[in-house]
Amino acid sequence: MRKKIVAGNWKMNMTFDEGQKLTSEIVNMYKDEAVKDVIAVLNPPFPHIFPVKKLIGATEGIALGSQNCSDKDAGAYTGEVSAKILASFGVQYVILGHSERREYFKENNELLAEKVKQALANGLTPIFCCGESLEIRTAGTHEPNVKFQLTESLFGLSPEDFSKVVIAYEPIWAIGTGKTATADQAQEMHAALRRHIASKYGKEIASETSILYGGSANPGNAKELFSKPDVDGGLIGGASLKSRDFIDIIKSF
Ligand SMILES: O=C[C@H](O)COP(=O)(O)O
């Protein structure tokens, strides 16, 4: 049975106090409201990693993630943070290939393949993002476009390594725009990605791969999105900054 995951991507938001308050509220609600069978992953900016980890403590079902890691192992790379350092602070997941990293920081499929390798070599679970622009969606070439991102960055992995990766499908036109993909559009792409994974790694690994949806997901649309057979959770931006909304999304399963 593949895992259900709802990951909150705080992006470049939250001061220290705000992050502490948000985390405490999420941890308390998750426990008090007896959330079960859905892993919540908090992905704060780097300085929050250690204090957020302390607040999560040993809470079963809540994990810590980061929003990026270096493609390098260690050394003189000013400003970079390696997967090894993150793992040593208790980080379990890392978001890689987010469209904002691809667009603003010029991360390409080749670089992302290296980051994925670093994450896996250090025991982190990559949440590998893929998704098409509005232009590509309008041209109708979204399916081959998104499959290509997986092929280029992930299909060099051994079956054993690939089976540790989580995929997040995030149509760029739906991120932060309030314009969610319909549940049917999400299902169509998730099913296509699962078939693509099966063509490389076989049906068993494909059926065990968690594929999350991201892009203006909120408590009002999560239930319909999560009701689709190939949607295994969400990568949540804006709505993950409000504890009530984030927990309500988790409880939409
Ligand atoms: O990583 C999260 C996605 O970019 C979605 O962001 P959003 O929920 O604010 O649209």
Image: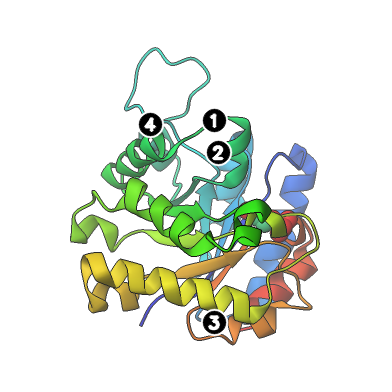
Q: In the image, 70: left or right of 245?
A: left
Q: Quadrant of residue 45?
A: top right
Dividing the picture into quadrants, the one containing residue 73 is: top left
Residue found at x 73% / y 63%: 216
Secondary structure beneath disc 2?
helix
As measured in the structure, the alpha-carbon distance from the residue carrying label 3 to the one carrying label 4 is 34 Å
Is residue 154 visible to the viewer in this orientation of the structure?
yes
Q: State the CA–CA distance, disc 4 to disc 1.
A: 14 Å
User: Which dot marks residue 102?
Assistant: 2
Badge 1 crowding class, 10 Å Cα cut-off, few under 14, some 14 to 19, many 20 or more, is: few
Disc on the earlier residue, 4 or 2? 4
Q: Residue furthest front?
A: 139
| Amino acid on which disc 4 is placed | Asp
For disc 3, the neighbor class at 10 Å (few under 14, some 14 to 19, many from 20) is few
Residue 106's disc number: 1
Task: Using the rendered view, name the quadrant where residue 31 is placed.
Answer: bottom right
Task: Pick whichever of labels 3 and 2 is earlier in the sequence.
Answer: 3
**Nearest to the observer: residue 239 or residue 190:** 190
Residue at image position (54%, 82%) is 36
Outermost residue toward the top in this view? 76
The image position of residue 67, as x and y in percent, is 55, 43
Where residue 113 sits: x, y (%)? 34, 41
- Disc 3 element: loop
Quick one: label 3 or label 1, which is nearer the N terminus?
A: 3
Task: Tell which tag, 3 or 1, sits nearer the viewer.
Answer: 1
Q: Dots 3 and 4: beta carbons under 8 Å?
A: no
The disc at residue 36 is 3
Q: Is mark 4 within 8 Å of ligand 1?
A: no
